[in-house]
């Protein structure tokens, strides 16, 4: 009996023989932010959804059984969860999952689309996981409102550009540069110490980043002018944020050094 149970468990964990999991929704906002969620209901103006938290991981060896929407630990604890479909890896020793967050609402005028993803059963010796996806478009063009003058295709490219920058663009040099400039400014006279950082942030913010790293979903839009502008806009916001975050500790360190070590 133990041998048979061990064999069944090993087969189950290594090959992930799963029933069809409950659908996961991805709400894509016009600013490029993507929200993993379970959409509960909606009306003419608002979408009601339960948020899914950031992905976590567990070693497969910690589990006794995996069900479509919950997992049973060896301790006997039965824990609800949702697969992190974007991070699923058959060869990984980990299970990637998301927990349910708090119910929330969002106004429809902020949303581009809602994508519903479902995971098919993973059969024996399968080396990939089939995921079906259905899109429900929320955005509608309105030439009388400046925010919605773009066509569906134009807005899709724009939103995908902003989404891509959120996922792929990094600007560590903005933070490092701001920290050093802030440090130097902090060593100056108290009344002029913020000036170098202010100038750095202003100058760094005027330089629009080029489109850099992108994801597989972005390939159809890579030469689209709306995608490029959306990417550069969001990347510029990331640069500005990093500059501000780098300035604060650098300036603080400079002021402390000037106050306690130099004087």
Image (tube, rainbow, N blue to C red):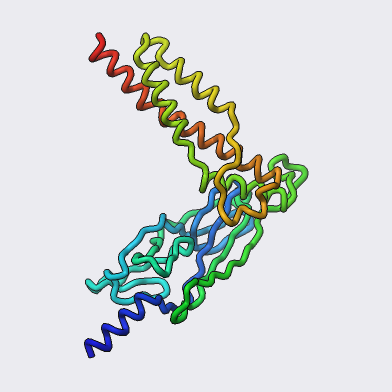
Quadrant of residue 26 within the rendered picture: bottom right
Q: Quick one: quadrant of the N terminus?
A: bottom left
Q: Quick one: quadrant of the C terminus?
A: top left
Quadrant of residue 177 within the rendered picture: top left
Q: Is residue 227 above or below residue 92?
A: above
- Percent coordinates x, y for residue 87 in the rendering: 45, 61
Task: Check the image and name the residue furthest to the bottom.
Answer: 1
Viewer-nearest residue: 216 or 39: 216
Residue drawn 46% across the image and 15% down it: 195
- Percent coordinates x, y for residue 202 in the rendering: 54, 23
Q: Is residue 84 above or below residue 2?
A: above
- Percent coordinates x, y for residue 231 in the rendering: 60, 42
Quadrant of residue 257 within the rendered picture: top left
Residue drawn 39% across the image and 61% down it: 99
Viewer-nearest residue: 90 or 40: 90
Residue 258 lies left or right of residue 54; in this view the side is left
Q: Is residue 94 above or below residue 141?
A: below
Residue 248 lies left or right of residue 22; in this view the side is left
- Percent coordinates x, y for residue 136 in the rendering: 64, 62
- Number of disc labels: 0
Task: Check the image and name the residue furthest to the right.
Answer: 143
Residue drawn 72% across the image and 48% down it: 154
Q: Is residue 185 above or below residue 98?
A: above
Viewer-nearest residue: 184 or 35: 184
């Amino acid at each position: 009996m133990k041998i048979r149970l061990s064999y069944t468990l090993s087969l189950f964990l290594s090959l992930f023989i799963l029933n069809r999991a409950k659908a996961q929704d991805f709400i894509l906002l016009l600013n490029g932010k993507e929200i993993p969620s379970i959409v509960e209901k909606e009306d003419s103006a608002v979408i009601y959804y339960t948020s899914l938290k950031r992905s976590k991981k567990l070693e497969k060896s910690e589990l006794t059984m995996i069900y479509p929407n919950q997992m049973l630990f060896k301790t006997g604890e039965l824990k609800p969860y949702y697969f992190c479909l974007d991070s699923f890896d058959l060869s990984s020793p980990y299970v990637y999952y998301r927990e349910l967050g708090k119910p929330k609402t969002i106004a429809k005028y902020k949303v581009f689309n809602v994508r519903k993803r479902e995971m098919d059963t993973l059969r024996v010796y399968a080396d990939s996981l089939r995921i079906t996806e259905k899109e429900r478009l929320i955005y509608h063009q309105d030439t009388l409102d400046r925010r919605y003058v773009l066509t569906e295709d134009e807005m899709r490219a724009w939103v995908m550009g902003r989404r891509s920058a959120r996922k792929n663009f990094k600007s560590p040099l903005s933070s490092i540069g701001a920290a050093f400039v802030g440090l130097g400014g902090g060593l100056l006279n108290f009344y002029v110490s913020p000036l170098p950082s202010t100038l750095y942030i202003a100058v760094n913010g005027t330089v629009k980043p080029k489109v850099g790293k992108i994801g597989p979903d972005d390939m159809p839009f890579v030469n689209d002018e709306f995608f490029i502008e959306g990417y550069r806009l969001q990347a510029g916001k990331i640069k500005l944020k990093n500059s501000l975050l780098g300035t604060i500790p650098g300036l603080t360190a400079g002021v402390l050094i000037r106050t306690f070590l130099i004087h």
